Each structure stands twice: as C-alpha cells, then as structure tokens.
Amino acid sequence: MVHPDPSSRPVDPAAHSPASTAVACSLWWADPSWAGPRLLALLDDSERARRARFQRAADRDRYTVAHALARVACAHAAGCAPEEVGFAHRCRSCERRGERDREPHGKPHPAGPAAGLEMSLSHSGDRVVLALTRGAAVGVDVEQVTGARDVDGLAKYALAGGEHADWRALPAPVRTAGFFTYWARKEALLKATGDGLSEGLTVVQVGPPHEPAVVRSWRTPEAPGAVYLTDLDAGADYRAALAVLAPGEVRVAHQDAAPLLGVHPR
C-alpha cells in the first residue's frame, strides 16, 4: 500500500481558485482487498453489470474498489452524497470517426453536482489509484512490473523507433521495469486526452525511464500544447505516472483512501 507523504497536506480540487495558475491534483490510493458488500453497493446498475463480466475475483475486486472510490471522492470534492454523482463516458476516437457508442465507454467525466471535476482511474496488482483535479484534464496509470508478460512483444507495439533503441540499450536486469515506466507514462498521457489505447501508444514519445519524465513528441492533430508529466512512487514492484494537461504548476497530494471509504485495513 502506498502511504501519503507526511510532509504534504491534502489538497481538495474543489478548492482550486481560477485566479491561481496552480492546478491541485489529489491522488487517492486504495487496495483491492477492501472490496466488499458496502463498496459494491456504491456502484450503479451499469457498473455492477460490467463488474459481473469479469471472470476472476481479483479483477472484480479491483473494479469494485476503483469505481466506489471514484464516486466517493467526487462526492467528497463536490460536497454532495455519493449517490448523486454520475459519470458520462466519452470516447474521443469514436467521436473523431463519427461513430455512435453501442455501450458507454471511454474516459469517465463526473456529472451531476460533481460536474467540472476531472478524473482518471487505474489499477494493477494490489494498487488502485484515482487522480482528481478541477478544470484540467488528468490521466493516471499504474502498472505492476512482471516478467510473466511478453515484454519484448509489447515493446514492439508500444515503443517508437528511438524509444525502442533507448530501451534495448538498458542493462538487462532493469529492462522489464524500464518498459513499464514507458508504458505508464504513455498511458497516463493518452488517458488525459481521452484517446486511450485506441490510437496506439506510438503516437506519443517520451524520454527514457532513467531520465525525468518528458514528452518528446506527440503525433496527433489534437496534441495538447501544455503537459505536466511525472513519475509516481507506487512501490518497488510497480511503475506509475501522472499527466495533467495544464501549463504552470501542478500541486500533487498523495492520500490514503481508507478513511475516505470508511475501511479499516488490517
């Protein structure tokens, strides 16, 4: 479990002042082991239906905790009850092609009293994270570092020419972790724009994993002009990144979601 930095104070995105150039981003960290009937009751009918389609219990638990956290955190920031918070999903790729959604999918946008908040969810292994801002698009991604996947094959899909060469130049013992750093940075960026993985990960290129997170190029007509990108410390066996589409300062506060969700981890 990721613990908040004791030197940072919680930042409520609802308190962000339009006159300030800084964007406040709350990062709420949770654990899928917290899943249970009380959190499941916070999901709406469509979320429960989607959850039921997961075959593995671990996947259902991650989904339950992530989506319950999204509803409760948005309600907390908006000053309303969780059941008042809804989510509208938008797929930018479908919009670009003029296609109508057969089923709601794409980036979730808080609705109802929480409208105006921006959010992004991610979960992997025993990490669940929610990024929450106001007035600035946000994307977050966390990846468990594992050699069980075909990293060489994934690298051919995810890394552009220069990135792939930089990655292959890494010492073998750190190559797998380095790949997941690339992946987390790229997915955070594409989740912030709402493109997701539909356009492929090679449309955006980032710096090598042993250097600070930067965007090298973005090969889409709607590439954002201002991007904040940073790596996150999610633990030794994880790689994570945060992207905020905003100029200027971004103030990030890591927060433990247990008190917010009313759970008492053992």
Image (cartoon, grey):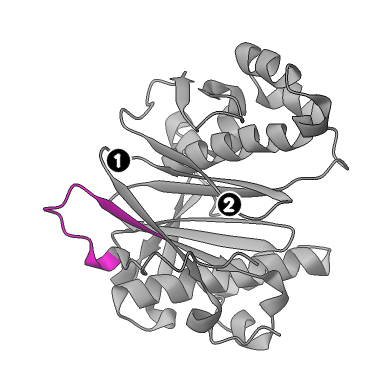
Q: Position of residue 173 (x, y in %)?
A: 82, 32
Which is nearer the eye, 18 or 110?
Answer: 18
Q: Quadrant of residue 180?
A: top right
- Calculate the distance from the C-alpha at mark 1 to the C-alpha at mark 2: 22 Å
| Residue of label 1 | 246
Considering every residue shown, the one lying at the far front of the view is 7
Q: Residue sitting at 66 percent across and 70 percent down?
A: 31
Q: Is residue 242 left or right of residue 43?
A: left
Q: Residues within 10 Å of mark 1 (few under 14, many from 20)?
A: some
Q: Quadrant of residue 207?
A: top right
Instruction: Write down the region rendered in magenta.
Output: 14-26
51 in relation to 242, above or below: below
Query: Does 17 appear in magenta?
Result: yes
Q: Residue sitting at 77 percent across and 29 percent down?
A: 175
- Three-letter amino acid code of the residue under disc 1: Ala
- What is the quadrant of the N terminus in the image? bottom right
Q: Contact (CB < 8 A) between labels 1 and 2?
A: no
> Number of marks in the image?
2
| Residue of label 2 | 233
Q: Residue sitting at 69 percent across and 50 percent down?
A: 238
Considering every residue shown, the one lying at the far right of the view is 148
Considering every residue shown, the one lying at the far left of the view is 19
Tell which circle, 1 or 2, labels the residue nearer the N-terminal end.
Answer: 2
Q: Position of residue 77 (x, y in %)?
A: 33, 72
Which is nearer the eye, 240 or 105?
Answer: 240
Inspect this view and state whether residue 106 appears: no
- What is the quadrant of the C terminus in the image? bottom right
Query: Does 78 appear in magenta?
Result: no
